[in-house]
Amino acid sequence: MAEKKKVEGKYLMYCNKPFVREGNTICYGDMNDKYVLFMLVLTNTEIEDANKNKVSMPDKILVQILSTDTSKNPVERIAKQFEKNGLYDAMDIGLIWLEKLNKS
């Protein structure tokens, strides 16, 4: 899954779509699409890196696929919601659902 990453403007771009993290909130997608991926880091876990430094890693992630239709109320905008352990699994499954819903 080696995709090109680049910084365009003030956002990190992943697969030509903005990838934005602010604190424990991660948003991915283009607001011109039908849906975007929203992830909320619920818990973090501390691990040691190769230099024996403690690093905080996202652990439990709440994933939501949200409609970009602002005329809907917030509850109706949630097309899919689930929890995953680890950022990789959350992003992997989230991208699959995002692509599937944006194609429909």
Image (cartoon, rainbow, N blue to C red):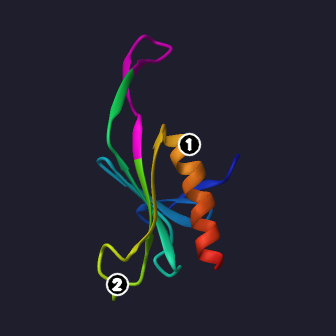
Q: Which quadrant does the C terminus fall into?
A: bottom right
- Which amino acid type is marked by label 1? Asp
Residues tagged 1 and 2 counted as in contact (Cβ below 8 A): no
Nearest the eye: 35 or 30:
35
Does 26 appear above or below 84? below
Does 75 appear above or below 41? below
* 70 falls in the magenta region: no
Query: Outermost residue, right direction?
Result: 1
Nearest the eye: 2 or 42:
42
Give the residues drawn in magenta, as a range. Answer: 47-61
x and y percentages locating residue 59 in the rendered image: 41, 34
* 50 falls in the magenta region: yes
x and y percentages locating residue 18 in the rendered image: 49, 64
In the displayed structure, does residue 12 sit left or right of residue 101?
left
x and y percentages locating residue 10 in the rendered image: 40, 63
Q: Give the mark nearest the N terminus, 1 or 2.
A: 2
Does 47 appear above or below 93? above
Residue indicated by mark 2: 70
Question: In percent of the image, x 31 and y 47: which residue is there?
Answer: 24
Is label 2 in a helix, a strand or a loop? loop
Residue indicated by mark 1: 89
Question: In percent of the image, x 59 and y 58: which residue is there?
Answer: 95
In the displayed structure, does residue 44 sit left or right of residue 67?
left
- Which amino acid type is marked by label 2? Thr
